[in-house]
Amino acid sequence: MNFTKDFLKKTVRVAQEIDAADVEKMVAILAEVRSNGGRVFFVGSGGGAGHASHATCDFRKLGGFDAICPTDNVSELTARINDEGWETSIAENLKVSRISANDAVFVFSVGGGSDEKNISRNLVNAVKVAREVGAKILGVVGRDGGYTAANADACLVVPTVDVALVTPLTEAYQAVIWHLLVSHPSLSKNTAKWESTQ
């Protein structure tokens, strides 16, 4: 009981400490990408890959975005990992998709990746490819934000309220933030099913 109450209190605290200006910056960039006919590539590993898949669905269906999740193509992903390696699996997908300055890469990651520590190099390399072509880089990350936050045009670093809960709270708020974005009046194009029945 005590753990449950404490977890929920910390969940509330994260919400109170999030900088709304960081979210609004993402809204402005995403609106610009859509109006310019650009695409949004949602990327992540583990839980982040699950979020990327779900966000792709919502941004396409509710936001009218041309959104893509490279890790959804399991055949291509595993062929690239097998033949070329994990570190370049997403970056090479972006290259084949001819990512351009009109597009954006949106990262979901707990640590944001690190070149120096050799962590989440697949995401680091995806950000590098995006940066090389002038694509926008966005992210919802935890800890200090890592490589993603250091190179992003807009990035929300989920506040750390308990080092023992960095992963669950970061991943929980990744879902909260992308749902916020796709519900935002500046980005929402279609009403979700249950809201439309009111």
Image: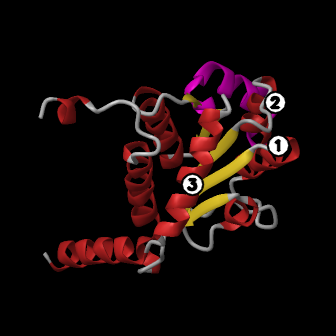
Task: Tally the marks.
Answer: 3
N-terminal of the pair, mark 1 or mark 3, is: 3
Q: Which one is in front in this view, the residue at disc 2 or the one at disc 3?
A: 3
Magenta span of residues: 69-87
Look at 68% across and 41% down and name the residue there.
104
| Residue 74 seen anywhere in this rendered image of the structure | yes
Residue 44 seen in render: no
Residue designated by label 2: 95
Residues at marks 1 and 3 touching, judged by CB atoms closer than 8 Å: no
Rendered image quadrant of residue 44: top right
Q: Residues within 10 Å of mark 1 (few under 14, many from 20)?
A: many
Seen as rendered, the residue at the extreme right is 132
At 48% across and 75% down in the image, what residue appears? 159
Pointer 1: what residue? 129
Residue 6: x and y in percent read 24, 79
Q: Amino acid at mark 2?
A: Lys
Secondary structure under tag 3 reads helix
Q: Amino acid at mark 1?
A: Val
Residue underneath mark 3: 26
Q: Is residue 75 left or right of residue 136?
A: left
Q: Position of residue 27 (x, y in %)?
A: 53, 51
1 part of magenta stretch: no
Q: Residues within 10 Å of mark 2 (few under 14, many from 20)?
A: some
Amino acid type shown at disc 3: Met
Q: CA distance from mark 1 to mark 3?
A: 20 Å
Q: Vertically, is 156 above or below 101? A: below
Q: How far, Cα to Cα, is label 2 from label 3?
A: 23 Å
Q: What kind of element bears circle 2?
A: helix
x then y, percent, for residue 96: 80, 24
